[in-house]
């Protein structure tokens, strides 16, 4: 394509129109709303489905959903998850149903936020949530334990009310 | 301390000169620091950003942090440089800017002392000779760095500065034809008694202004530095405080040239109202004059900084064309016209 290049007029050669238009643009930007996000105070709201830090969740009746099946520990590519299952002793408060882990640790320095743990979890107990840019002052601090993970994870109910039913069954059996 | 009141004593002269030098430094150095700050904030505002606002209230301590950082950074000297010249180049680029300030009257009088460090009768000739020394720092840096981008920057600097030096000198000639004296104090006196010279010599002012941009390597004439094509030109190989010296030298040169323009074209420390046109009789009046002068210089600094974000860089040939084929003939014509008018007035 041939571009038509018109020669500059004498007025344009004085650079005055350039100066005026430059001045207009700069002044108009001077009072415009700034786009800077002042990071630690303001943060992005990440979109739905964002793969942030994996946290454990509870259901609406304050029950830990994790049952120590250790599938996430097995699938975790960087081996960031370490689960200590409860062993043979029975948690009196929870009856004989499902084994809540004694300890559940995620090393956030190792975690690569791949989301395999969330995908593999049969109990929908672990979710990659919206936290990003985790910080700490030591390596130890970056290993999140069960209490911390549950606290950060919050409550997330699923449609399957499996545990309600199990609790009912248990209550019914003990009633005999 | 009796000798302080005896104006003929050599000790008085020495004492007050030293005091004025220290005061000038104490004012100019923070001005340099805060010009950098202003540049960053203003450029940010123009680009829809906020700019440095973390250090201190409104980020006002940012220059201190910058200075501290420059001192703490590793002073790296590449193995391929010519060491002696490499080390003296930053100083050579910074000193002329400060030397210029020596002859500029930054206020009227305070007590018995005139507010100028050196009241030279050849003031402007001294200024031009010193300002043209500024290019040596850059050329020396470009050459001593012994690497291609600084070298190109140095070459461009020498060509550009020599070209615009001439236009600048020529532009200032009509001013002194009108004033009839080379002393900068006399220039201010002349303007206080009549109109500011910017109204009498607008063409001279425009040429001087553009040449000042070229002399201080500011956009649109920052070819020696041109970050996009020459990495950062003559200071590519510099780091730490040496780099900071170049940086401060650039801003000090801007302040010096602004002060010069204020003196030559905008009436120096005078204002045509509130009776600020006459030399001060009290200390408060003297301070008011200094503040007026600094205010005018600050306006020029804002202008310098603003222009940077308004116009893109000139091409090398455009720069040369503008300097030699437009401004030089125009300045010469201006001299001849001024001479003709003066001649007719004397007929």
Image (tube, grey):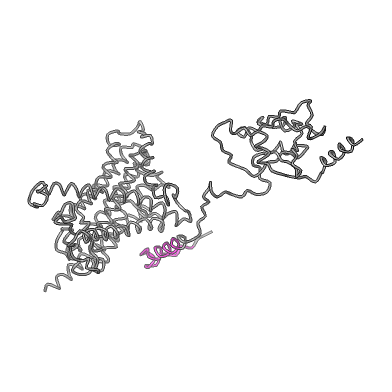
Q: Is residue A24 magenta?
A: yes
Secondary structure mostly seen in magenta is helix
Residue B338, x across and y down, in percent: 19, 67
Q: Is residue A11 left or right of residue A115?
A: left
Name the spot of residue A32 as percent of width and height, x first: 49, 61
> Horizontal and vertical percent for residue B60?
39, 50
Furthest residue toward top: A88
Q: In this orientation, which residue lies closer to the viewer: B294 or B201? A: B294
Could you tell whether A55 is left or right of B6 in the image?
right
Quadrant of image for the C terminus of chain B: bottom left
| Number of disc labels | 0
Q: Residue B223: horizontal and vertical position, in percent?
A: 36, 50
- The image quarter containing residue B78 is top left
Q: Nearer the viewer, residue B310 or B287?
A: B287
Which quadrant of the view contains residue A148? Answer: top right
Q: Residue furthest left?
A: B8
Locate residue A23: give its quadrant: bottom left
Front-lying residue, B238 or A36: A36
Q: A167 above or below B110?
A: above
User: In the image, which residues are magenta?
Assistant: A4-27
Q: Is residue A112 magenta?
A: no
């Amino acid at each position: 394509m041939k571009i038509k290049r018109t020669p500059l007029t004498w007025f344009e050669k004085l650079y005055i129109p350039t100066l005026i238009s430059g001045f207009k643009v700069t002044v108009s930007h001077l009072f415009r709303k700034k786009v800077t996000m002042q990071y630690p105070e303001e943060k992005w709201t990440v979109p739905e489905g964002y793969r942030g830090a994996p946290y454990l969740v509870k259901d609406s009746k304050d029950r830990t959903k994790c049952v120590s099946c250790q599938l996430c520990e097995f699938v975790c590519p960087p081996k960031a998850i370490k689960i200590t299952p409860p062993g043979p002793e029975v948690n009196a408060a929870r009856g004989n149903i499902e084994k809540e882990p004694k300890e559940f640790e995620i090393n956030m320095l190792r975690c690569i936020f791949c989301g395999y743990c969330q995908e593999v979890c049969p109990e929908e107990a672990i979710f990659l949530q919206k936290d990003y840019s985790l910080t700490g002052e030591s390596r130890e601090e970056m290993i999140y334990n069960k209490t911390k993970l549950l606290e950060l994870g919050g409550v997330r109910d699923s449609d399957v009310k499996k545990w309600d039913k199990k609790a009912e069954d248990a209550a019914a059996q003990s009633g005999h | 301390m009796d000798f302080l009141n005896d104006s003929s004593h050599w000790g008085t002269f020495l004492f007050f000169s030293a005091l004025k030098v220290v005061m000038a430094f104490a004012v100019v150095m923070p001005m340099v620091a805060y010009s950098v700050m202003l540049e960053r904030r203003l450029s940010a505002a123009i680009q829809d950003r906020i700019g440095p606002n973390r250090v201190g209230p409104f980020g006002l301590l940012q220059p201190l942090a910058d200075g501290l950082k420059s001192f703490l950074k590793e002073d790296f000297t590449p193995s391929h440089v010519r060491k002696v010249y490499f080390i003296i180049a930053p100083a050579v680029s910074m000193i002329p800017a400060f030397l210029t300030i020596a002859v500029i009257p930054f206020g009227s009088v305070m007590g018995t002392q005139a507010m100028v460090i050196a009241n030279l009768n050849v003031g402007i000739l001294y200024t031009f000779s010193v300002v043209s020394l500024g290019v040596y720092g850059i050329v020396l840096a470009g050459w001593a760095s012994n690497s291609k981008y600084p070298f190109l920057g140095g070459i461009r600097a020498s060509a550009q500065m020599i070209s615009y030096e001439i236009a600048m000198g020529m532009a200032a000639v009509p001013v002194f034809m009108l004033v009839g004296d080379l002393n900068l104090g006399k220039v201010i006196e002349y303007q206080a008694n009549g109109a500011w010279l910017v109204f009498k010599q607008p063409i001279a002012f425009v040429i001087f202004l553009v040449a000042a941009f070229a002399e201080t390597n500011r956009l649109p004439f920052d070819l020696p530095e041109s970050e996009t094509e020459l990495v950062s030109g003559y200071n590519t190989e510099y780091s730490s405080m040496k780099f900071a010296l170049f940086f401060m030298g650039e801003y000090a040169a801007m302040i010096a040239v602004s002060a010069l323009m204020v003196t030559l074209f905008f009436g120096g420390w005078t204002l045509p109202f509130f009776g600020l046109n006459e030399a001060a009789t009290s200390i408060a009046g003297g301070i008011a004059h200094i503040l007026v002068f600094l205010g005018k210089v600050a306006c020029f600094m804002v202008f310098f900084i603003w222009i940077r974000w308004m116009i893109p860089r000139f091409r090398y040939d455009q720069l040369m064309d503008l300097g030699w084929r437009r401004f030089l003939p125009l300045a010469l014509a201006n001299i001849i016209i001024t001479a003709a008018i003066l001649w007719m007035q004397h007929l």
